[in-house]
Structure formats: C-alpha cells, structure tokens
C-alpha cells in the first residue's frame, strides 16, 4: 500500500483535544488507521499530549503532511493494549523492539527520509518489501530494524 500523505486541508474540521498540528493530525490519522485495520481488536486511541496508561504501549507513527511541495514527517502516538500490539505487530521480536525504537525517533525519521529521497536502499527482505510497494512506516521500521540499523550509515 502506498503512503498516505496528508495536506493541511485534510486537517480542516478535525475534532481534536487541542488545536495544535499534532493533535489535529492525530485525529485524522486515527480515522485513517481505523479504516485500514480490519479485524483489529478495539479502537484506535491516539495519545495526543498524554503518556500511555500503565500496561499499555505508546507506539509512534510517522504520518506525512505536505507542506508546500515537500512532505514532512510528524510523529504522532497511538496507545495500544497488549492484544492490539500483538494483532498489529505479530512478530514477537519486533514487538520487543518497540520500546527501544521509541527512543530513536530522530534515527527512524532519518532512515525514512533517506528511503524516500532514494539515498538509502536496504537489501534483502527489507528492500524487497519496499520494492513490493511498502513504505517506511513505523511498522516497517520495527519489522526490519536489524537490517536497517546495520546498513544505514549517513
């Protein structure tokens, strides 16, 4: 599936907790995720400016918004219950990486931008996934992190 790039017009009328760009984009992105996830247990819950509830996992997403001619990545956070995290990211090793990856947002964003710009092309299954139409979402980054972190050298 191709990456959905939002525009400022997409945020018009977004009913968010506050009016900031991040909260408005979180609201719109939650609707986008809800439409994509079939068989997903429960509803998509975005964090906005709060932290995850104990026992839940905060998962970053990188929706892109078109600002002028260039897409910009914005980090928004989803709160997932354990069964939601398992449904969304079935590989246990990739799920175990989520907490460490949330501390590496700048590196993840740099990898996304390099892939988008064509200055970094991962090899093996990570590269094949992109060739098959995947885009470097957080899900992709978590699944292929061992390859990406070894190969990406800016």
Image (cartoon, rainbow, N blue to C red):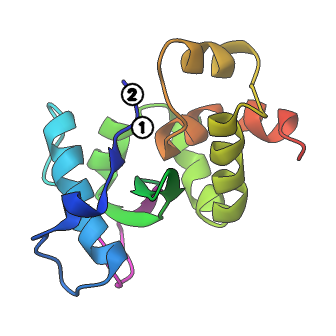
Q: Mark 1 and mark 2 in contact (Cβ < 8 Å)? A: no
Q: Which mark is residue 2?
A: 2
Residue 84 in percent (x, y) is at: 28, 47
Residue shown at 78%/34% (left/top)?
A: 119
Residue shown at 64%/32% (left/top)?
A: 144
Numbered-mark total: 2
Q: Nearer the viewer, residue 74 or 77?
A: 74
Which portion, as a residue range, is magenta? 46-61
Residue shown at 71%/31% (left/top)?
A: 118
Label 2 to label 1: alpha-carbon separation: 19 Å
Tell me: 139 left or right of 142: left
Q: Looking at the figure, which quarter contains the N terminus?
A: top left
Q: Decide: few, some or many residues near mark 1? Use Cα within 10 Å; few <14, some 14-19, many ≥20.
A: some
Q: Quadrant of residue 121?
A: top right
Residue 150 in percent (x, y) is at: 85, 36
Tell me: 148 left or right of 80: right
Q: Nearer the viewer, residue 27 or 124?
A: 27
- Residue under label 1, please give it: 89
Q: Decide: few, some or many residues near mark 2? Use Cα within 10 Å; few <14, some 14-19, many ≥20.
A: few
Residue 12 in percent (x, y) is at: 15, 68
Label 2 SS: loop
Q: Nearer the viewer, residue 44 or 18?
A: 18
Q: Main secondary structure of the magenta part?
A: loop
Label 1 SS: loop
Residue shown at 74%/25% (left/top)?
A: 122
Residue 125 in percent (x, y) is at: 65, 15
**Can residue 38 be seen from the camera position used here?**
yes
């Amino acid at each position: 599936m191709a990456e959905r790039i939002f525009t400022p017009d997409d945020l018009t009328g977004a009913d968010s907790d506050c009016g900031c760009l991040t909260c408005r984009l979180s609201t719109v992105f939650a609707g986008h995720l809800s439409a994509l996830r079939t068989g997903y247990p429960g509803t998509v819950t975005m964090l906005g400016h709060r932290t995850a509830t104990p026992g839940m996992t905060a998962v970053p997403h990188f929706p892109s918004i078109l600002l002028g001619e260039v897409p910009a990545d914005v980090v928004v956070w989803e709160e997932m219950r354990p069964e939601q995290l398992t449904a969304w990211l079935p590989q246990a090793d990739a799920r175990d990486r989520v907490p460490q990856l949330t501390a590496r947002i700048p590196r993840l964003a740099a990898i996304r931008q390099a892939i988008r710009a064509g200055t970094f092309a991962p090899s093996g299954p990570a590269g094949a996934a992109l060739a098959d139409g995947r885009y470097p979402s957080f899900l992709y980054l978590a699944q292929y992190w061992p390859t990406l972190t070894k190969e990406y050298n800016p």
